[in-house]
Amino acid sequence: MRPVVLSIVLLCCSFVPAQETVTPPPAQTPQPPTPAAPAATVEQESTTPPAPSTEKESLPAPKNDKKQTPREEAWEILRLGAQNKSADRRTKSIGVLGLVPNNAEARKFAETGLQDSDPRVRAAAATALGEMGAKPSIALLEKQLDDDDTGVVLAAAKALLAMNDKAGYEVYYAVLTGERKAKGSLIHEQMKILHDKKKMAEIGIDEGLGFVPFAGMGYTAYKMLAKDEVSPVRAAAARALAQDPDPASAHALADAVGDKSWIVRKAAIDALAKRNDPNWLKAVIPAMADEKDIVMYTGAAAVIHLTDVPPRNTKRRKKK
């Protein structure tokens, strides 16, 4: 029996599957998947111009590497000043526009200031229009004669008189007598100011200090005079040299643009602008970076004006 059983066992073992006896292959490190080849539609898109993006506004604006000209920089300084939240800065930036005559953009800037909510800005705008001789603005200035603030009324009257408009006399008559010639008495608010000693003193200071760069500053100017007796006098001297034809005076004014006193710096820039000589443009350009805002605004206005002035003929005349 044993040989028969052994034969049966051997026969059954021969039917076992071969893979069960094979040693399993060693584990392989998984390889990253091979990127699929781009579809034909992708190749077609690369040759087709891209469609306009609907998110163009979210993209960063292209950089403008073009350097501003001094004139462009000057206008930007004055625009930012006129739009500033500070009424003091709006007053200063609009007040210096008187240095820019015969310029429609400067005139419109000042006319906008007549509508400002702060009376100091309105007064500065009226003063600037008078200094630039803006006759197209006469009708607007005449409307300011009915302003609630006496300072604005006086500034408008002075501007009108500077342009030979006799309506300005009526206001000074009213200040002297308390009533107007043609329109009767002053309005209630203006009468109140005429009895306000502090306000009238402030208006008087503004009127009296017109020869130095204190217009519109009232008691601030008075305090400055009390602290510094020399600088205002030097500033007045600088402005007096505006019409001196001597080249030595022009050089002195150019040097004064870098004076340690901001009052003198402002007056010197003002005088150089009024000399109407574009050859001194380079002397006032640095003032646009002055740390004192009133000097910066004055420098900007001077740059605009001197770039408006035609270049002078510096050629010597030939001898006959």
Image: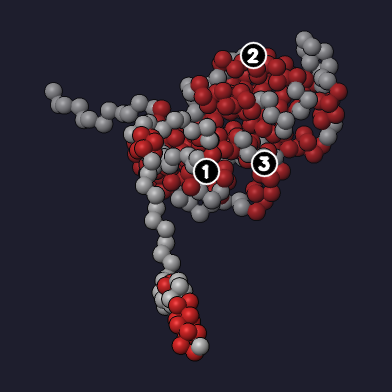
Mark 3 or mark 1, which has the lower sequence index? 3
> Is 222 rendered above or below residue 57?
below
Residue 238 is at least partly visible in this image:
no
Q: Amino acid at mark 3?
A: Ser
Residue 3 is at least partly visible in this image:
yes
Q: Residues within 10 Å of mark 2 (few under 14, many from 20)?
A: few
Alpha carbon distance from label 3 to label 2: 28 Å
Q: Secondary structure at mark 2?
A: helix
> Is 30 rendered above or below residue 257?
below
Q: Residue furthest top?
A: 182
Q: Pointer 3: what residue?
A: 86
Q: Pointer 1: what residue?
A: 296
The mark lying in front, picked from 3 and 1, is: 3
Q: Position of residue 250 (x, y in %)?
A: 39, 40
Q: Position of residue 270 (x, y in %)?
A: 49, 37
Mark 2 or mark 1, which has the lower sequence index? 2
Q: Residue furthest front?
A: 1
Q: Secondary structure at mark 3?
A: loop
What numbered label is drawn on residue 89? Answer: none
Q: Pointer 2: what residue?
A: 139
Instruction: Identify the residue shown where x is 39% and y is 27%.
Output: 309
Q: Position of residue 286 (x, y in %)?
A: 43, 46
